[in-house]
Amino acid sequence: MTTVTIPGAHDDTALDIGRHLEGRTLILVSNREPYEHERREEGEEVSVRRPAGGLVSALDPTMQRTHGTWVAWGSGAADRETADAEGRVAVPPEDPSYTLRRVWLDEADVNGYYLGFANSALWPLCHMLIQHFEFRSEHWERYTSVNARFACALADEVRRAEGRPVVWVQDYHFALVPHMLRNEFAPRDTRDLTPFIHQFWHIPFPPPDILRMLPHGVYPALLEGMLGNDLVEFHTERYATNFLSCVADAIEGAEVDLAGRRVQINGRTVEVGVFPISIDVAHYDELARAPEAEARARELRRRHAGRSPDGQHCQLAVSVDRVDYTKGIPERLRALDLLWTEFPELRGRLTFIFVATPSRSEIDAYRALSDEVGATIASINERFGGNGWTPIIYVNENVDAPMLASVYRAADICLVSSLQDGMNLVAKEFIACQVDECGVLVLSRFAGAAEEIEGAVLINPFNVDGFARGIRDALAMSDDERRRRMRAMREQLQGATIFGWLDDILSRVATLADAGPAARRS
Ligand code: ADQ
C-alpha cells in the first residue's frame, strides 16, 4: 500500500490544542474524508490519498493526538473493501491512532444532496449570487435523508465514546445534522447523554431577504437544523449577524440577542461565535524559502517577467482558485482586458499566471463558466499578445503546494477578486509566501479576508474601471510602500494561524461544555 502524505501541523501544537478536550472524545463530521483509499484499475494495489487541504492537515494531527473519530463520505474506489461492516477504518494507515467512519452515498445521493441542494441551492444563496440558485424538492429531500444518515452514524459514535463527547460539524453540507443528532438524545431518563454539538460554517451567511428565497418550509427547517448546535461558528461578524437576523425573521419563539450573539430557544442557549480561519503560516513560509522554490521562482520570472521584449520591466501577476462563479474570474479577466486596451503601454509589462483547478464540472453553471474562461483567455492572448509575449498563462489544473509557494513567491501582484467569499485562503497563502516582501495583494472587499487583513489594495470586482485602476495602482506602487504593506500583513498573519483558530474554537467549546447543559439552559 502506498501513502501520499502532505506535511501537517507540528506535533507540539496538536498536543497543545488537544488539552482543551480534557479527555473528551472529539467526533468530527465533514463531507470530504481525510484518507481516501484508491485503486485506479482492477488488480492494482490500493493506495491512500490525503486531500491536500489546510483544514485536513490542521485537524488530522489533533485527531491523532486525541484519538477521536472522523465521520465522512466514503468516496474512494477502494474505501469499502478497506473498512469494516460499519464503514470504520483505523487511520492514518501507517500508524493508526483514530477512527475514520465512512458513510456510503450512491449516485442519487450525490446528485441530490451534494451537487443538488448543497451546491446548486445553498452555495449560490449563501454567496448571494441568486442567478445560480436552483431549488428542487427532490434535492431537498435527498439532502434531508443524507443528513439523517450522517446524524445516525454520529449518534452511534457518540454512544460508543466514553463520557460526553464533543461533536464538530463542518460546513453547509450538514445544516440539519445538529438538530437531528440532538433529537437522538432527547433525555429519556434522568441521564442526559447529549453530546456538545458545534458547527463551523465555512462560507458566507446571507441576510434574511436572500435566504427567504428558499421555499416556505425549507427556510425555517434549515435554521432549526443549525439551532441544534450549542455553538455556531462563522468567519466574520457580518455572517454571524446575518445568521441571527435570519433566526429572528423565521423562527417563532426564538429570542435573539444580537449584541450578545446568542439565541434562546426551547429552554436552551445557542451561542454564535466569530473565528476567522487561517493557514499553517510557518509551513507556507518554509515552502517558499526552500532553495528549490527560490530556483523555480527565479525561473518563472526569467520566463514570464523581468525584461519585456522592448527592454522594459515586466511584472508578474498571479491568481489561484477553483473555477467557481463566486471567485470573480470573468470580472478579473474583464479588468485586465480593459487595462491592456486603455493602456497599450502596459502590454508586455504585465504577465498574468492564472492557476485554476477545475471544480464541480457536473453542474451546468460550472461547465459554462469554464468554457467562458477558456474562450476569454484565448481572445485576450490573441488580441494583445505577440512578439514573444503571452499576456495570460493559463494553468488549468491542480498544482502541488511547493509549486504554488514558488508561484506566490515569484509574483509581484496577487489578484483575489471574489464576488463573495467566506474567507479566501489564497490571499493568506500569498502573504505567507512573500518572503522577499515585494508583492502587492489586490483583494476584493467582498472576501472575508478583507475584513481582517490591513494592507491590501481593496477593489470591487463588479466595478471594472475601479478594478483596473486597482491593478494599475499596484503596478505603480513603490518598493518601499510594497515592503511596508507586506511586512504589516505578514506580521498580522503570523499572529493568526490555523492553529490559533483551532485553539480559540476548542477553548470556547471547553468553556461552554464545562458550564454543562444545565448551566446553558435559561
Ligand atoms: P474555497 O472556496 O475552496 O474554500 P479558498 O479559501 O480560497 O476557497 O481555498 C482554496 C484552497 O484551494 C487554497 O488552499 C488554494 O491554495 C487551493 N487551490 C485552489 N486552486 C488550486 C490549484 N489550481 N492547485 C492547487 N491548489 C489550489 C471554502 C470557502 C472559503 C474559505 C475556505 C476555508 O469558500 O471562503 O476560506 O473554505 O474556510
Image (spheres, rainbow, N blue to C red):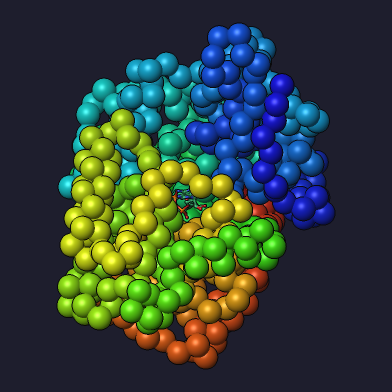
Instruction: Provide residue 179's location: percent of width, then percent of height.
Output: 47, 34
- Seen in the picture, residue 210 relative to 184 is either above or below; the reply is below
Instruction: Provide residue 412's location: percent of width, then percent of height.
Output: 46, 74
- Seen in the picture, residue 361 relative to 124 is either above or below; the reply is above
- Seen in the picture, residue 14 relative to 172 is either above or below; the reply is below
The quadrant in which residue 82 appears is top right
Instruction: Provide residue 229's location: percent of width, then percent of height.
Output: 52, 43
Tell me what residue is drawn at x 72 percent, y 51 percent: 9
The reply, left or right, for residue 237 in relation to residue 129 is: right
Tell me what residue is drawn at x 23 percent, y 35 percent: 364
Tell me what residue is drawn at x 25 percent, y 81 percent: 345
The reply, left or right, for residue 309 in relation to residue 399 is: left
Q: Is residue 428 visible?
A: no
Count of marks overlaid on the render: 0
Q: Is residue 84 visible?
A: yes
The quadrant in which residue 222 appears is top left
> Looking at the image, which is closer to me, 359 or 380?
380
- Quadrant occupied by the N terminus: top right
Instruction: Provide residue 66's location: percent of width, then percent of height.
Output: 77, 40
- Seen in the picture, residue 272 relative to 80 is either above or below; the reply is below
> Looking at the image, which is closer to me, 260 or 473?
473
> Looking at the image, which is closer to me, 380 or 55?
380
> Looking at the image, which is closer to me, 399 or 125?
399
Tell me what residue is drawn at x 33 percent, y 47 percent: 324
